[in-house]
Amino acid sequence: MRSDSIVFAVAGMCFGVILGWVIGVQQAGLRPAAALTAAVPAGEGTGAARQAPSLDEARVQSLMTVIKNDPENAGAAVELANTYFDAEQYADAITWYEESLRLDPSNPDASTDLGVSYYYSGLTDRALEQFEVSLAIDPGHTKTMLNQGIVLAFGRQDLAGAQAAWEGVVALAPDSPQGQAASRALEGITAAGHGAAVPGG
């Protein structure tokens, strides 16, 4: 699903340029797949208008049928949330991620995707709170930590907090896709001249 790869799209961008925007330099027309949706005000720095992906209506109907016949099916609720997420219909994605977590509160992936959906809906504080829920479920969940760093950087302009989150990812899984993405992010912070300010450091 796209929500698994969304942070990696950010990792492929020039973190120095993006973090420069966070620091105060106008972001120069770059727009990763969705990662700066909540960081850059609508219509600014996005270039030409981009059409949202279309909703897979047949999949929605199929999953709705499954859920109607089995209301306790957390997996179907997650898949439905993912389908709405992929179409960038975040309000509906939030509804179904929340439902899936009501049915199965031990799923850190669904919890993190819910946090990402909050962020894309402009709810930075709720996103960060949800990431804390994910980390309570799985303290070593690197996908959560990577997203946490992105939201701290772009939603809060908290580069020290973002750096700490990304350093945690690198410490846990340096060779994983998440670890490589976090390493690029840390290089961007260093290139932007803000490399040593870790909370408590």
Image (cartoon, helix red, strand yellow):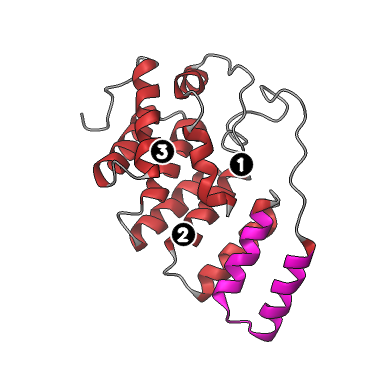
Mark 3, Cα crowd under 10 Å, few <14 / some 14-19 / many 20+, is many
Q: Which residue type does callout 2 highlight?
A: Asp
Question: In x, y percent, where is residue 51?
Answer: 78, 39
Q: Check disc 2 and report the residue beneath it.
A: 109
Extent of the magenta region:
58-85
Mark 1, Cα crowd under 10 Å, few <14 / some 14-19 / many 20+, is some
Say which of marks 3 and 1 sits in front.
Answer: 3
Question: In x, y percent, where is residue 23?
Answer: 46, 19
The image quadrant where one finds the C terminus is top left
* Disc 3 element: helix
Seen at 61% across and 23% down, the residue is: 30
Dot label at residue 149: 3
Say which of 162 and 33 sits in front: 33
Q: Check disc 1 and report the residue beneath it.
A: 122
* Disc 1 element: loop
In this image, 69 relative to 175: left or right? right
Image quadrant where residue 153 sits: top left
Residue 47 is inside the magenta segment:
no
Q: Between disc 3 and disc 1, whose residue precedes?
A: 1
* Disc 2 element: helix
In this view, the residue farthest toward the left is 201
Give the main secondary structure of the magenta stretch: helix
Say which of marks 3 and 2 sits in front.
Answer: 2
Image quadrant where residue 161 sits: top left
Seen at 44% across and 66% down, the residue is: 107
Q: Between disc 3 and disc 2, whose residue precedes?
A: 2
Q: Which residue type does callout 1 highlight?
A: Gly
Say which of 59 and 122 sits in front: 59
Dot label at residue 34: none
